[in-house]
Image (cartoon, grey):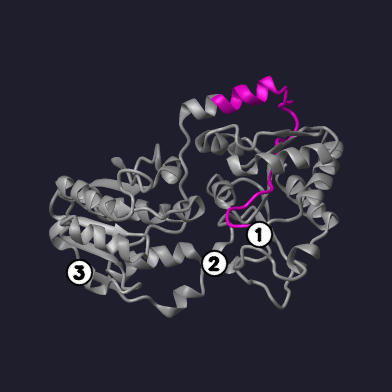
Amino acid sequence: MGFIKLTDRPEARIMIRAANWVGDAIMTTPVIRAVRKNFPKASITVLAKPWVIPVYKNNPFIDKILLYDSKDRHKKGVGTLRLAKDLRGHQFDLAVLMQNAFEAGLICFLGGIKERLGYNTDGRGLLLNRSVKLNPALKKGHLIDYYIGILKGAGLKDDGRNLDLFISKADQAFADYFLKQAEFDASRPVIGINPGATGGTAKRWFPERYAELCTRLSEKFKVKILIFGGPADVALGQHIAALSKDCCINIAGTTSLGKAFALIEKCSLFITNDSGLMHAAAALNINQVAVIGSTDFIATAPSNKNSIIVREQVLCSPCLKDVCPTDHQCMEKISVDRVMETCNSLLKANG
């Protein structure tokens, strides 16, 4: 199942179908780096939906990013055929499918891509001529290893588990300017929280506890706390800012994802729920406290050594539900004192 012909062809064109969520996209970056290592002279293109494109911008292992415009030009139905036609025009030699959906295999088949590599899940085995049988053990492990397993299953070499996230100079300059304008003292820690999470409230530690934590951190370190989040988190950020007695700066929904990455890179400490920004902080090797309740902490744990998971083992966890149907004990049992103690330990150890 080797790729000898491709490795001998400097002009080989490779397309990687990106994952659809920010956190998952970040966890696929070791695969992208490994594909470059396996095919050093190839042209590598990532096909991605618009909201995850910032994860791949500035990545030196990628030559081009193609937009998967699923809400307009490539909307399901006729748009799927249009996307396949677009891919056919690029004459790709190999597709590496990070996404497991049937559609991912179909568009590559219809797009005339000669070699189509991915897991043989979702009934798409016949659409893949480089079909990899999913090792059941990978289902119980971390998603990084799950994605790397696609390459290993095809006999390709991996390049380790380190995550990649590259920030543009323009976004770094914005972060410097923002902190200067907000009068952050360079001698004091920059602390951020990310109280939201995609997919419902079950993954979220309570806003009242985030507010109390912010108040205590602000008083102890004499700093303002940055509240991160996307457009859907604006009201949540405002609520926490109001509860925390004017010790926070709510930037939820006010920056691009790339600029949010740049501000996270400036943080001395980041406190977050299980989310895409949690994986961004891990990729940037930021001191991090991850409060995890309803999700599978084994599969989605932040992959850097200076991240600490705070969680409580309860009978119903991980339930993987969007909204807790009972009493939310997985979060209820996590006290502000406990999170504050963990924050102190990280700042002390890495200060």
Identity of the residue furthest to the front in this view:
78
Residue 192 is a magenta residue: yes
Q: Secondary structure at mark 3?
A: loop
| Residue that badge 1 annotates | 203
In the image, taking residue 101 as reference, residue 315 lies left or right, namely right
Relative to 232, residue 147 above or below: below
Structural distance between the alpha carbons of marks 3 and 1 = 38 Å
In the image, which residues are magenta? 174-201
Give the quadrant of the N terminus: bottom left
Say which label, 2 or 1, has the lower sequence index: 1
The quarter holding residue 107 reads bottom left
Percent of width and height locating residue 127:
22, 68
Q: Nearer the viewer, residue 240 or 219?
A: 240
Residue neighbourhood size for the residue with mark 1, other residues' Cα within 10 Å, grouped as few (<14), some (14–19), many (≥20): many
Which residue shows up at 54% across the image and 24% down it? Answer: 173
Query: Residue 299, which numbered label?
Result: 2
Structural distance between the alpha carbons of marks 2 and 1 = 14 Å
| Residue that badge 3 annotates | 129
Kindly identify the amino acid type of the residue bearing the numbered disc 2.
Answer: Ala
Q: Tell me if residue 230 can be seen.
A: no
Residue neighbourhood size for the residue with mark 3, other residues' Cα within 10 Å, grouped as few (<14), some (14–19), many (≥20): some
In the image, taking residue 339 as reference, residue 34 lies left or right, namely left
Relative to 346, residue 171 above or below: above
Which residue shows up at 18% across the image and 49% down it? Answer: 85
Structural distance between the alpha carbons of marks 2 and 3 = 28 Å
Relative to 112, residue 328 above or below: below
